[in-house]
Amino acid sequence: MGNKTVSHVADIPDWFDLNNYDAVETFSAAEWAAQLGHRRYIQWLLGRNNESYADDILSQFSVIKENPTAYIRPRFLLSLDGDIQHASTIVRPMTCGLAHAIGSDINTKLGLGDGDSLGAVDRYSVSRFYKDSDFEIDHFVPLVIDLDCSDVDIKNDFSKYLKQVRAFTGNENKKTHITKSDLDRLNRYRILPYIDLLIWSAIEKRRIYSRVLVDTLYCDNAAINMRGEAFITETLKPFYEKVNGAFIRALHNCKHYD
């Protein structure tokens, strides 16, 4: 990997073919949510910069390269068999995988080995740890519920805690609304192949020039080609940044356009 940039369309890998993404034209909102959520998870793993995730990342991405629009079972449904039957993207059980990732982040940030003491951090909430660190947890707030208490007390306490943790994290009470225009742009801007190229470039540690993205993703679109690199910086990237965890969860709960 001597060349750290991708400056020509010829440098795009052979597995990448826009024809393999034709199925997105008929995606429902829920199908978009599953595909985008799966890729966001891979990007989240990449952002950990942890070698222990490397094999998992490569394995999951190899499946995408083989068939980028194949059905993906939403991650929050993966463990329902024999587990807590709660199919929600909003309030859901913490998985062992997420608990492991949180522990790994804490060890990495503090430079800890097995058996080392957390020191003062032992008394921190997980929310405080992530607020004080450079790691991303996608606005998740892990908490412990004491089931020995009554439902009334638990619900009252949760309402109070929700207000406190929103104030502490600065994550406001707001709802993401998905419009028909959002769904159209996911397809028209070719968000899925764009993200796959971003994942590939992150794995390979290479940067793709904006002009190459235009020529690779929109060679059949005269209007976008006329705008050139400005389309990438002024239109594609801002929309891509909008496709965050809240957007994907709203997609999953969007029934009107399915």
Image (cartoon, rainbow, N blue to C red):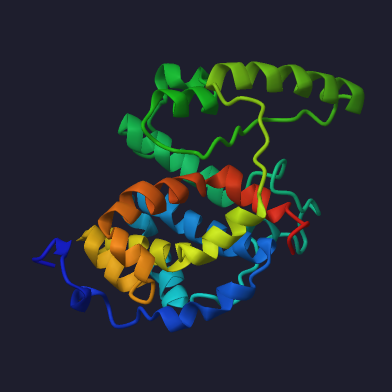
* Res. 155 image quadrant: top right
Q: For the C terminus, which image quadrant?
A: bottom right
| In front of the other: 109 or 60 | 60
Task: Give coordinates of residue 192: x percent, y percent.
Answer: 47, 65
> In the rendered image of this protein, does residue 173 appear above or below residue 178?
above
| In front of the other: 245 or 122 | 245
User: Could you tell whether 121 is left or right of 155 in the image?
Assistant: left
**At 35% from the left edge and 71% from the top edge, which residue is drawn?**
222
| In front of the other: 225 or 63 | 225
Task: Give coordinates of residue 154: x percent, y percent.
Answer: 83, 24
Task: Give coordinates of residue 130: x percent, y percent.
Answer: 46, 29
> In the rendered image of this protein, does residue 124 appear above or below residue 93?
above
> In the rendered image of this protein, does residue 113 appear above or below residue 123?
below
**At 74% from the left edge and 16% from the top edge, which residue is drawn?**
160
Q: For the N terminus, which image quadrant?
A: bottom left
> In the rendered image of this protein, does residue 235 appear above or below residue 29?
above
User: Could you tell whether 173 is left or right of 69 in the image?
Assistant: right
**At 66% from the left edge and 51% from the top edge, which residue is drawn?**
179
- Judge whether residue 173 can be spotted in this image: yes
Task: Give coordinates of residue 12: x percent, y percent.
Answer: 25, 74
